[in-house]
Image: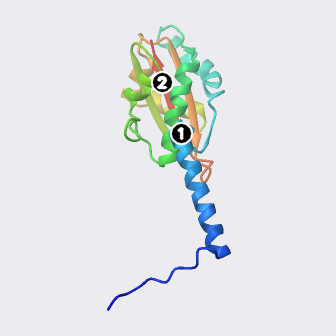
């Protein structure tokens, strides 16, 4: 006995509207993922500037030169923050071709480089404090080779209070 599945007629308004909405949503997400602009919001233009004083204080207390904020590093940090927000997980590798080394290379960042990441309901001061209280992250923040940094965060629209942070430090 042959079974058949009854589907709504292609010209029914419900089916067309639903298909159109789902298709438009999938198309939009695919386009955003392809260009690197993932859903969410971020402080890409301001997080580094807001952390400049704290970073200067940390480095000065350790007898190190201050770090300058860098737009190129901030852009790479914002990419990482968006990747994490889109995936809902904190990880340096956020998909095929989106690992730390690949991001650094695609952003044409040269020299010594390190990345710290964090997630939670926090501002930049709290993220920096958390990193300074973790030996490996502190080592990155106090590495004398580094002269510049970029800090950014992103959150997913469905959970705007939860931020994914990334800081990239480079020589």
Left-right relation of 117 to 3:
right
Residue at the spot 54% in from the left edge and 20% down from the top edge: 72
The tally of labels here is 2
Left-right relation of 58 to 1:
right
Q: Between 64 and 39, which is closer to the camera in this rendering? A: 39
x, y percentage for residue 14?
A: 65, 74
Left-right relation of 125 to 171:
right
Q: In which quarter of the view is residue 25 placed?
A: bottom right
- Within 10 angstroms of label 1, few (less than 14), some, or many (20 or more) residues? many
x, y percentage for residue 19?
A: 59, 65
Q: Secondary structure at mark 1?
A: helix
Q: Quadrant of the C terminus?
A: top left
Mark 2 lies on residue: 168
Q: Is residue 112 above or below residue 102?
A: above
Q: Quadrant of the N terminus?
A: bottom left
Q: Secondary structure at mark 2?
A: strand
* Mark 2 vs mark 1, CA separation in Å: 14 Å
- Within 10 angstroms of label 2, few (less than 14), some, or many (20 or more) residues? many
Mark 1 lies on residue: 82
Of the image marks 2 and 1, the number of the one nearer the N terminus:
1
Residue at the spot 59% in from the left edge and 32% down from the top edge: 124
Q: Between 133 and 101, which is closer to the camera in this rendering? A: 101
Residue at the spot 62% in from the left edge and 62% down from the top edge: 20
x, y percentage for residue 134?
A: 40, 31
Q: Is residue 3 above or below residue 112?
A: below
x, y percentage for residue 70?
A: 57, 17
Residue 120, visible in the rendered structure? no
Q: Is residue 89 above or below residue 97?
A: below
């Amino acid at each position: 006995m042959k079974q058949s599945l009854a589907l709504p007629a292609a010209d029914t308004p419900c089916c067309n509207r639903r298909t159109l909405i789902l298709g438009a949503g999938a198309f939009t997400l695919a386009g955003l993922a392809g260009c690197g602009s993932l859903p969410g919001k971020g402080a890409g233009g301001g997080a580094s500037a807001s952390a400049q004083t704290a970073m200067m204080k940390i480095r000065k207390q350790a007898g190190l030169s201050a770090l300058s904020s860098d737009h190129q590093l901030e852009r790479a940090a914002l990419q990482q923050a968006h990747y994490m927000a889109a995936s809902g997980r904190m990880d340096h590798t956020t998909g095929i071709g989106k690992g730390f080394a690949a991001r650094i290379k695609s952003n044409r960042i040269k020299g010594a480089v390190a990345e710290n990441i964090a997630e939670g309901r926090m501002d930049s001061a709290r993220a920096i404090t958390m990193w300074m209280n973790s030996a490996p992250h502190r080592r990155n923040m106090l590495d004398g080779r580094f002269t510049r940094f970029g800090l950014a965060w992103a959150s997913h629209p469905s959970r705007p209070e939860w931020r994914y942070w990334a800081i990239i430090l480079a020589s």
